[in-house]
Image (spheres, coloured by chain):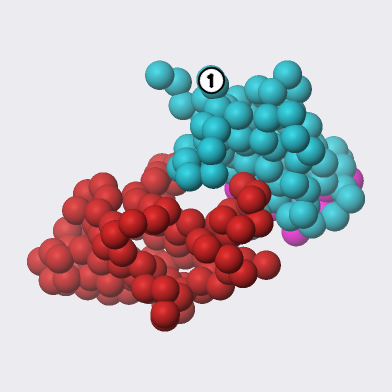
Amino acid sequence: GAGVSQSPSNKVTEKGKDVELRCDPISGHTALYWYRQSLGQGLEFLIYFQGNSAPDKSGLPSDRFSAERTGGSVSTLTIQRTQQEDSAVYLCASSSPGGRDTQYFGPGTRLTVL
Amino acid sequence: AQSVAQPEDQVNVAEGNPLTVKCTYSVSGNPYLFWYVQYPNRGLQFLLKYITGDNLVKGSYGFEAEFNKSQTSFHLKKPSALVSDSALYFCAVRDLNTGGFKTIFGAGTRLFVKA
């Protein structure tokens, strides 16, 4: 079946502009995660959604970052007033219900802020 | 709060030799532990996980990992390395007792296997 998809694959923007990154999880997966991978760095947890529960936003680095998940499926990560330090690969993952389950990752969106 | 440490930025191994990629963790309760691999120009892939039961966990591509509670470690191992194993490896932990899905990843260890 289809895996996790993300769009766009690459995004180049100017400092100060807003960007939206999209994630389509695997059908039926109730948990959805966003991570950030900066050059030479590990994966930094940003936020996760689980069903209808309130999302865990504890990893969002600033109030310029926000995310929503509509209808329990597609998610959008929005970065307002982008800064050069926001340049990174943004990864989305989904997993099926239950804390034991593995995460399936999308190919990521490479964001470059000029 | 949970945390993960991968003390080696890079591990170099000759093909055919055993490999070990180290991981230690810290959680307040019982851990769920994972290893993921990122091949060049490919997405992150699941390798194996420890939830409960046997401390030795076997996963994809001949990899295994041993959960050691006293040392809070979950080192990744393979008896005989292949050049195709060269990739970036991430250890990750979830704290079962918090009841949440938050997963913390280590900084990653780059494995180079020479022919």
User: Is B55 or A106 nearer to us in this picture?
Assistant: B55
Residue A88 belongs to the span the image colors magenta: yes
Residue B111 placement (x, y as % from top left): 32, 66
Colour of chain B as rendered: red
Residue B30 belongs to the span the image colors magenta: no
Tell me the kind of residue under disc 1.
Ser
As drawn, is A78 to the left or to the right of B100? Answer: right
Dot 1 falls on which chain? Answer: A
Where does label 1 land, which residue?
A27
SS class of the residue under badge 1?
A: loop
Q: Is residue B115 visible from the viewing direction of this image?
A: no
Classify residue A17 by image quadrant.
Answer: top right
Image quadrant occupied by the N terminus of chain A: top left
Q: What is the span of residues highlighted in magenta in the rendered image? A: A81-89
Residue at 15 percent across and 66 percent down: it is: B79
Residue at 69 percent across and 23 percent down: it is: A72
Relative height, residue A90 to residue A96 (above, below) = below
User: Is B12 or B2 nearer to us in this picture?
Assistant: B2
Residue B94 placement (x, y as % from top left): 55, 56
User: Is A8 or A100 nearer to us in this picture?
Assistant: A100
Relative height, residue A101 to residue B37 (above, below) = above
Colour of chain A as rendered: cyan
Classify residue B85 by image quadrant.
Answer: bottom left
Residue at 40 percent across and 44 percent down: it is: B45
